[in-house]
Image: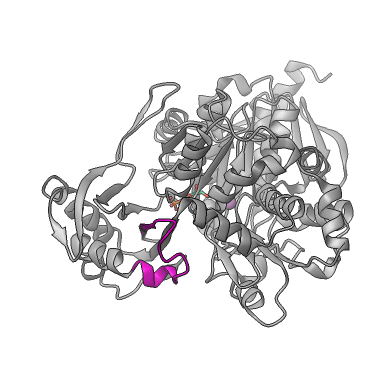
């Protein structure tokens, strides 16, 4: 044991001045690397976490990141600050890396007080790219808004931070060492998490499917999922390594943007829509919590994937009884609502961001949750989980013997199809983006009853969420305009962008089981896209003719 007095000799108290821009967004604090590299910027934010969450003193904390540029420098600083702030034991992913769902799994398994995840998720990496810090609590999930608000308040008045004066820890060696009075345990980043996944899915059935000639293309996008995919797919299921692309994590993600969508995953889409396409395609994002799913010649929209998983999950051993309830973010399509309705289970509607699912999961109200942005997950952890969703799909395909296309056709034929798309206007001037929102809000009261083209508005509001468990209210979570036909659009500003603003337009149109279920979504949605633009004046106000990304 290092005595307290001896510990104190290592601790330095450094004077600092507050930064004004440390408000966490949808998923932690996300800024340009050059912003994080300003003297004391990272330290102020980390100290604010320790100042607010006082029970971390004496507790166990999990640390790891998505391996992006600055991960290795930042984690050493954070560990020294954790030691100075009295954390008793740090559990750190090998080489400082943990996927976000693996971090959630490890927090829960080791009953840690929380975890610090170094990730800017789907944002670009490298010296000119982005960096981020997420803080998760003892349930393994992102902390609720009241906590992130308190952390932000602390950053505005911080005067000092504490750090120990100690050499860097060698994170390339598995094992236990010590910084000042804190044990540092470097663990295998994948095994606990891979064990958890293996307990939920029928790996033998999936293995037999691959042995029978089933083929897959999984793109790890040079992000954190590579080592996890190698362990799960290659080592445990026996998938041929040629079916896993870009499995080596790189600090700049090989120059790509690790955001699983048709624009950032062109190669995968080309493969899946080309001659000789494999049976199944998938990709995950920078920190491994998101996924996209494709079949031969078919892209499954994330909202549809959530609905298909809910409808078929009983085929996986961990979910034999089906869900007790489900939840989706407000902007996610209502395909899952129809499935939940048929199953006779409740469907909750939350704001964007996984932190809003935590209470529902902790209280046993829901089994599955999802977001239109390619995040899908269950009560096995408290984060969205890319590999979990991919394995769920593989398990469904193996157990049913059906193709991805058949699963989708059957879903639409029994529930109808919610055509859905998201249009992103990225890097726009913040003032212009805010004026789109303000103008739209000013019109809301007059919209109901008005007809545009062939649609009559039935409801228009700014979404306010009241958490059914703790009663907390979150206002201004996006503007939604619904039509009598069931079509709707939503407009909100992104909370993860680091340059100007990103405005997201979400559009949805329902086609019943007897209708045309095989349209190109962009064609099916033309009218509602035009109506949204007419009402919200997006293109004119932003000065942009087209969105940067359509997914
Ligand atoms: C985006 C997505 C949201 C997701 C968030 C964090 O937020 O739309 O659904 O929860 O990213 O994801 P926004 O505010 O930019 O729309 V991340 O993968 O930290 O994996
Ligand atoms: Co992510």
Q: Total marks drawn?
A: 0
What residue sits 43% from the left and 44% below the top? Answer: 352
What residue sits 42% from the left and 48% below the top? Answer: 334
Report the side of 239 relative to 111 (left or right).
Answer: right
Quarter of the picture containing the N terminus is: top right
Q: Nearer the viewer, residue 133 or 415?
A: 415
Looking at the picture, does residue 455 appear above or below residue 177?
below
Q: Which residues are magenta?
A: 502-525
Report the side of 13 relative to 473 (left or right).
Answer: right
Q: Position of residue 348 (x, y in %)?
A: 44, 35
Report the side of 186 relative to 549 (left or right).
Answer: right
Answer yes or no: is residue 224 visible: yes
Q: Nearer the viewer, residue 11 or 307?
A: 307
In terms of image quadrants, where is residue 87?
top right
Within the magenta stretch, is there residue 418?
A: no
What residue sits 59% from the left and 75% below the top? Answer: 266
Q: Position of residue 15 (x, y in %)?
A: 51, 35
Say how the picture is coloured. one colour
Q: Position of residue 541 (x, y in %)?
A: 21, 66
Which residue is at the far front?
514
Looking at the picture, does residue 14 appear above or below residue 262?
above
Answer yes or no: is residue 168 visible: no
Q: Nearer the viewer, residue 231 or 142?
A: 231
Which residue is at the far bottom?
275
Q: Nearer the viewer, residue 499 or 351?
A: 351
What residue sits 76% from the left and 50% below the top? Answer: 399
In terms of image quadrants, where is residue 538?
bottom left
Q: Position of residue 114 (x, y in %)?
A: 63, 29
Within the magenta stretch, is there residue 516?
A: yes
């Amino acid at each position: 044991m290092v005595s307290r007095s001896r510990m104190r000799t290592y601790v330095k108290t450094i004077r600092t001045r507050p930064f004004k821009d440390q408000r966490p967004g949808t998923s932690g604090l996300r800024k340009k690397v050059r912003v994080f590299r300003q003297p004391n910027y990272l330290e102020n934010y980390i100290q604010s976490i320790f100042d607010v969450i006082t029970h971390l003193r004496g507790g166990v904390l999990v640390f790891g990141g998505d391996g992006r540029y600055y991960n290795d420098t930042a984690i050493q600083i954070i560990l020294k600050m954790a030691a100075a702030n009295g954390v008793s034991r740090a559990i750190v992913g090998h080489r400082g890396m943990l996927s976000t769902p693996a971090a959630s799994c490890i927090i829960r398994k080791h009953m840690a007080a929380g975890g610090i995840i170094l990730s800017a998720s789907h944002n670009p990496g490298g010296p000119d790219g982005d960096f981020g810090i997420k803080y998760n609590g003892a349930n393994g999930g992102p902390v609720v808004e009241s906590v992130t608000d308190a952390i932000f308040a602390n950053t505005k008045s911080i005067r000092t931070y504490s750090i120990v004066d100690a050499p860097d820890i060698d994170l390339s060696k598995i094992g236990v060492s010590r910084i000042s009075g804190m044990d540092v345990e470097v663990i295998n980043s994948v095994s606990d998490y891979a064990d958890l996944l293996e307990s939920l899915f029928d790996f033998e059935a999936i293995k037999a499917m691959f042995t029978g000639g089933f083929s897959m293309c999984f793109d790890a996008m040079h992000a954190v999922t590579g080592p996890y995919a190698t362990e799960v797919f290659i080592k445990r299921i026996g998938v041929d390594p040629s079916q896993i692309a870009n499995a080596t994590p790189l600090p700049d993600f090989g120059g790509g943007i690790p955001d699983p969508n048709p624009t950032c995953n062109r190669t995968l889409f080309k493969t899946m829509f080309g001659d000789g396409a494999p049976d199944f395609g998938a990709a995950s994002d920078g920190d491994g919590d998101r996924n996209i799913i494709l079949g031969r010649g078919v892209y499954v929209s994330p909202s549809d994937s959530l609905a298909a998983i809910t409808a078929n999950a009983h085929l996986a051993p961990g979910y034999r009884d089906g869900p007790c309830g489900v939840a989706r973010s407000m902007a996610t399509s209502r395909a899952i609502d129809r499935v939940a309705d048929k199953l006779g289970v409740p469907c909750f509607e939350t704001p964007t961001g996984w932190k809003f699912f935590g209470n529902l999961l902790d209280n046993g109200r829901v089994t599955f949750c999802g977001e239109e942005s390619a995040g899908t997950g269950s009560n096995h952890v408290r984060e969205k989980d890319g590999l979990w969703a991919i394995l769920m799909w593989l398990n469904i395909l193996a157990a049913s013997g059906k193709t991805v296309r058949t699963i989708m056709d059957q879903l639409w034929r029994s529930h109808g199809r919610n055509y859905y798309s998201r249009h992103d206007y990225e890097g726009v001037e913040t003032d212009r983006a805010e004026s789109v929102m303000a103008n739209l809000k000013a019109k809301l009261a007059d919209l109901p009853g008005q007809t545009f083209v062939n649609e009559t508005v039935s409801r228009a509001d700014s979404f306010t969420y009241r958490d059914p468990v703790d009663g907390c209210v979150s206002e201004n979570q996006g503007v939604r305009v619904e039509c009598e036909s069931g079509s709707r659009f939503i407009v909100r500003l992104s909370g993860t962008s680091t340059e100007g603003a990103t405005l997201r337009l979400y559009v949805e149109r329902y086609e019943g089981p007897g209708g045309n279920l095989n349209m190109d979504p962009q064609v099916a949605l033309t009218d509602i896209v035009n109506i949204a633009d007419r009402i919200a004046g997006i293109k004119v106000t932003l000065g942009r003719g087209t969105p940067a990304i359509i997914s």
